[in-house]
Amino acid sequence: MAILERNDSGGVAHLRMNAPERLNALSDEMLAELQRQLTALQDDRDIRVVILSGAGKAFCAGHDLKQMTAARQSEDGGKAYFADLFQRCSAVMLSIQSLPQPVIAQAHGIATAAGCQLVASCDMAVAAEGTRFGVNGVNIGLFCSTPMVALSRNIPRKHAFEMLTTGQFMDATRAQELGLINRVVPPEDLETETTALADLVAQKLGSVVKIGKQAFYQQLQLPVEQAYGYAGEVMVENMLYRDTAEGIAAFIEKRTPDWQQ
């Protein structure tokens, strides 16, 4: 049984974390498989959108605490292992952002600590009613410093800080209000609604979504004036695409565009 399952359909790749007995914890094995699939998707032109979900009763419960505890038995108390672990985890989160295709988290149950970080790192997220989100490490004496990076770039800082310092969960409705997720749907509609969103994005011109995702994250890091300059350059490049000219012509002529990408 694969720890990470992949099923492709109509330009959408569905990655499902498949370790329900461990609440899909980001173990060494899970991180390795996530990184392997994300690397493979980088150059997969047949895939336009990626959905990330979890099997069983939870989306992801964060790092594998049993593996982390075992690592403390080493001569350095686990220092080298922990440094490598958090680097590997951060690499997975950054790979999601650098992936050409939009990534949609399909969350249910709980998404806690690095599992909440995973949701925050995705480009969009749909959650089932009743899903709870948290960065609860403080409850066991471990501040969720790396999850904090993605979380604080999704929701207002005071709300992020409250979550980090109280260890309390946030429900799906509040998570949507603050911007951590896009939609809250009934549990029985979670897969259908997430797939519908993915299919809608997959219908768009892939090369344009790719350049747009890259530009979206790049301009966020720039002062406003520089962001406009950069975005203008991106639009100039976009306007020179053959399929963009075709799309504009098709809109004017009220017909379906004949896109080649």
Image (tube, rainbow, N blue to C red):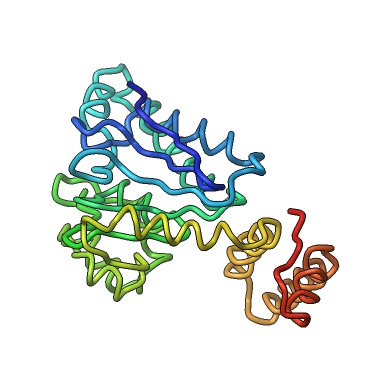
From the viewer's side, name the closer residue of 189 and 116: 189
Asked whether residue 149 is in view, the answer is: no
Query: Going by the image, does 169 lie left or right of 243?
Result: left
Q: As displayed, is residue 70 above or below residue 194?
A: above
Instruction: Determine the image quadrant of residue 134.
Output: bottom left
In the image, residue 29 lies at what x, y percent? Answer: 37, 25
Instruction: Determine the image quadrant of residue 66.
Output: top left
In the image, residue 86 lies at what x, y percent? Answer: 40, 38
In the image, residue 223 lies at what x, y percent? Answer: 63, 76
Query: Going by the image, does 116 lie left or right of 84?
Result: left
The residue located at (25%, 54%) in the rendering is: 135
From the viewer's side, name the closer residue of 57 and 203: 203
**How many numbered markers are drawn?**
0
From the viewer's side, name the closer residue of 212 and 166: 212
Query: Going by the image, does 175 lie left or right of 248?
Result: left
Q: Quadrant of the N terminus?
A: top left
The residue located at (40%, 32%) in the rendering is: 5
Q: As displayed, is residue 10 above or below residue 251?
A: above
Q: As displayed, is residue 158 above or below residue 204?
A: below
In the image, residue 77 lies at what x, y percent? Answer: 28, 24
Asked whether residue 82 is in view, the answer is: yes
From the viewer's side, name the closer residue of 243 and 32: 243
The residue located at (19%, 64%) in the rendering is: 170
